[in-house]
Image (tube, rainbow, N blue to C red):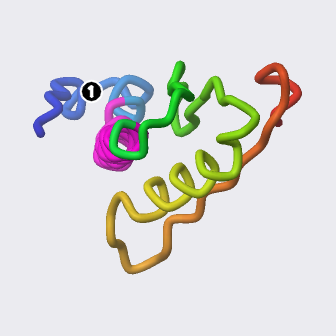
Amino acid sequence: RKRYLPDINSGNAIVRGYAERNAINAPIQGSAADIIKIAMIRIYKRFEEEKLRSKMILQVHDELNFNVYKEEKEQVKKIVLEEMEGACKLRVPLIADCGEGFSWLEAH
């Protein structure tokens, strides 16, 4: 993955500083996006394999939202945590948590 940052050589310190911060942040953000995409694909496949009716409905940055049937709640929670925490092997563990509620706000 390449991110072109022509302003990295700018004579303007403010513009150059912005480009430098983007250069540092881009690999981190890109890797995080790749990791959550892997988790989403694996979660979807597990839902299909286990014939769950619950659905993944929304991704916002590092969060996933689901519509979950009550009788599937524990199974969905187990799958989501396993797949999010196991999406990528790193030197430090990936830790996921789970909230629940009737709205996104309530789930936090």
Q: Residue at x 33, y 63 (%)?
A: 88
Indicate the secondary structure of the residue bearing disc 1: loop
Q: Where is residue 107, by image quadrant?
A: top right
Image coordinates of residue 53 in percent, x first then y, are 52, 27
- Would you say residue 16 is visible in this rendering? yes
Image coordinates of residue 56 in percent, x first then y, are 51, 27
List the residue tagged with mark 1. 11
Q: Which residues are magenta?
A: 19-47
Image coordinates of residue 73 in percent, x first then y, are 70, 43
Q: Is residue 105 magenta?
A: no
Q: Residue at x 82, y 36 (%)?
A: 108
Q: Relative to 48, is 100 on the left or the right? A: right
Q: Residue furthest bottom?
A: 91
Q: Residue at x 40, y 64 (%)?
A: 86
Image coordinates of residue 5 in percent, x first then y, are 20, 28
Question: Is 47 in front, or is 88?
Answer: 47
Q: Is residue 38 magenta?
A: yes
Q: Residue at x 53, y 19 (%)?
A: 57
Q: Amino acid at mark 1?
A: Gly
Q: Residues within 10 Å of mark 1 (few under 14, many from 20)?
A: few
Q: Where is residue 68, by image quadrant?
A: top right
Q: Relative to 56, is 76 on the left or the right? A: right
Question: Is 19 in front, or is 73?
Answer: 73
- Would you say residue 24 is visible in this rendering? no
